[in-house]
Image: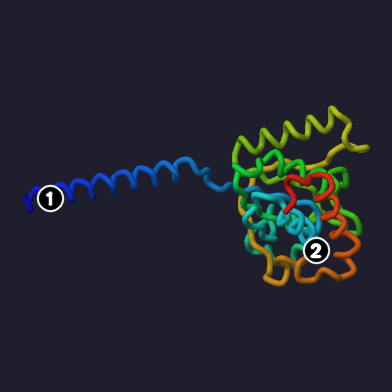
Amino acid sequence: MLIIKLIRSYLFSGSLCLMLGLYSLSNATAAPAEQTAVFSGGCFWGVDAVFKHVRGVSEVVSGYAGGSAATAHYEQVSDGDTGHAESVRVRFNPAQVSYQQLLQVFFSVAHDPTELNRQGPDVGSQYRSAIFFINTEQQQVAQRQIQQFTAAHTFPSAIVTQVVPLTQFYPAEDYHQNFLALHPYKPYIVMYDQPKLTQLRKQFPGLYQ
């Protein structure tokens, strides 16, 4: 009898482990992997802050895209001749916020897509409007969104946003990260970036966090 009980106990434990394993595998399969998006819309301080307040976004890093590793430094990028644009890398959960929704926030709140090589007081190609796509799907979604905005005359002037492939993203210096949260009363932040958060809350209340 003891042997039979041990066998039954062993079989039960094995079945339980198998069931738990299958359950965990099912949950892992069901959970969508996080995705990455890279946007350039002027000074990265404000764009960073906007996306940090979007539900479903887990991480935003300020940095540089469009140039080489050798020139991915603020002092050099600021000269405007490195090919880099001040950018943000956004990690997001597509089950909570879609890439298209991020695009809508980017175009409607984070920056003005009709300004060529500038944003507000900041002038130069490093402040250009650009979407650095990771794959063909992102490219198509971005191009389609621009076409829709253009057809609907959403903006008073033509959209000048570039849609280009991402070759590499380089994180900016530590003192640029999470800048708005660390310097909320800096005059530039108060004048140009805090209003973006107000607009995000107003235009996308369901996405604001």
59 sits to left or right of 48: left
Q: What element carries label 2?
A: loop
Outermost residue on the right side: it is: 156
Q: Residue at x 88, y 59 (%)?
A: 192
For residue 209, above or below residue 98:
below
Three-letter code, disc 1: Lys
Which residue matches tag 1?
5
Which of the pair 53/109 is nearer the observer? 53
How far across and down, in percent of the image, does residue 112 sit?
A: 86, 47
Three-letter code, disc 2: Asp
| Quarter occupied by residue 195 | bottom right
Which of the pair 70/132 is nearer the observer? 132
Which residue matches tag 2?
79
Gap between marks 2 and 1 measured at Cα: 78 Å
Sequence-wise first label, 2 or 1? 1
| Quarter occupied by residue 103 | top right
Q: Is mark 1 on a helix, strand or loop?
A: helix
Q: Residue at x 93, y 37 (%)?
A: 156
The reply to whether residue 84 is visible in this rendering is: no
Which of the pair 190/84 is nearer the observer? 190
Q: Residue at x 59, y 42 (%)?
A: 95
How far across and down, in percent of the image, does residue 27 sit?
A: 44, 44
Outermost residue on the top side: it is: 151
**Nearer the viewer's eye, disc 2 or disc 1?**
1
The reply to whether residue 175 is visible in this rendering is: yes
How far across and down, in percent of the image, does residue 58 sit?
A: 62, 55
Which of the pair 165/79 is nearer the observer? 165
Whether tag 2 and tag 1 are in contact, CB under 8 A, the answer is no
The coloring applied to the image is rainbow
Q: Residues within 10 Å of mark 1 (few under 14, many from 20)?
A: few
